[in-house]
Amino acid sequence: MSGSMTGIARLLALTAIAVTLAGQRASAQDARLVAQLDGPTQAQVSAVIERARAASLPVEPLVDKALEGARKHAPDARIVDAVTSLAARLDSSRRALGSASTEAELVAAAAALQAGVGTSVLAQLRQQRAGRSLAIPLVVLGDLVTRGVPHDTASALILLVAHEGLGDETLLAIQRDVQRDVRDGAHPATAAAIRARGAVSGAATRLRPTKGPLASGSASSAAPASTGTTHPAGGKP
């Protein structure tokens, strides 16, 4: 009996500590919001944050979003809308990716959704990379769309790379190469398609900066590596 009571007392003590720490974190977040937002705006933002906390969603990204709006002197209504929209995207992301998703995965997924990627793509990506983090694939996906690659094209490429079992280092290399290609004048969709195909085939590719057909999205002006093993998207080996 004594041992049982001791165990209960210990459990209650641990629970009290957890509640105290949670309260301290909430207070720290509230202090930041109080310092940067006016009363009504802070109250609305805090309400969104508390609902997210109750749903076990990450709340720090919501605080950061509100503080970003304050730093940029955004209108109060826009700050509230931005925080509310982000909370909704985080919730949609978790529904698509699963309850065990990490904060990094949810934040990256929310950014991808904002860029126009569908929740079905998130679910497919989780299936393709079961047991592996999706943070990097989702970051690369969002970045490709932001740089002008159509979201359906970018989604298909990321899913292809995942299906082939290629790792994060491959995705980061594709991201880096597409950034350089676009900067040099390549059409975003063409650059992404060639880089992804080159990664999947295992061949190094290069893209000759050009204008005209390439700038309009045609892959015919893309120059594959001299090995001859890689061809523009849509071409035949």
Image: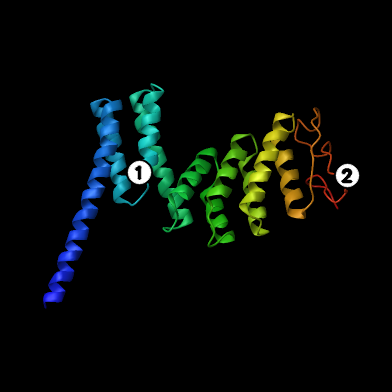
Q: Is residue 159 left or right of residue 63?
A: right
Q: How is the image coloured?
A: rainbow
Quadrant where the N terminus is found in the figure: bottom left
> Where does the image place residue 206, in percent across and percent down from the top left?
79, 40
Nearest the eye: 70 or 121: 70
Mark seen at residue 203: none
> Where does the image place residue 228, in percent across and percent down from the top left?
88, 48
Res 153 visible: no
Residue at figure coordinates x 62%, y 47% from the top left = 155
> Where does the image place residue 124, in percent across and percent down from the top left?
57, 57
| Residue type indicated by callout 2 | Ser
Res 147 visible: yes
| Residue type indicated by callout 1 | Val
Relative to 32, residue 137 above or below: below
For label 2, the crowd category at 10 Å Cα-Cα, with few meaning under 14, some 14 to 19 and many 20 or more, is few
Residue at figure coordinates x 17%, y 62% from the top left = 12
Q: Secondary structure at mark 1?
A: loop
Nearest the eye: 172 or 14: 14
Q: Quadrant of residue 126?
A: bottom right
Marked residue nearer the N-terminal end (2 or 1): 1
Mark seen at residue 226: 2
Relative to 127, residue 217 above or below: above
Q: Are marks 2 and 1 in contact (CB under 8 Å)?
A: no
> Mark 1 sits on what residue?
59
> Where does the image place residue 225, in percent across and percent down from the top left?
84, 44
Residue at figure coordinates x 54%, y 38% from the top left = 115
Q: Measure how far apart labels 2 and 1 are at the Cα level.
A: 50 Å
Q: Secondary structure at mark 2?
A: loop
Q: Quadrant of residue 149?
A: top right
Nearest the eye: 169 or 111: 169
Q: Is residue 236 left or right of residue 78?
A: right
Front: mark 2 or 1: 2
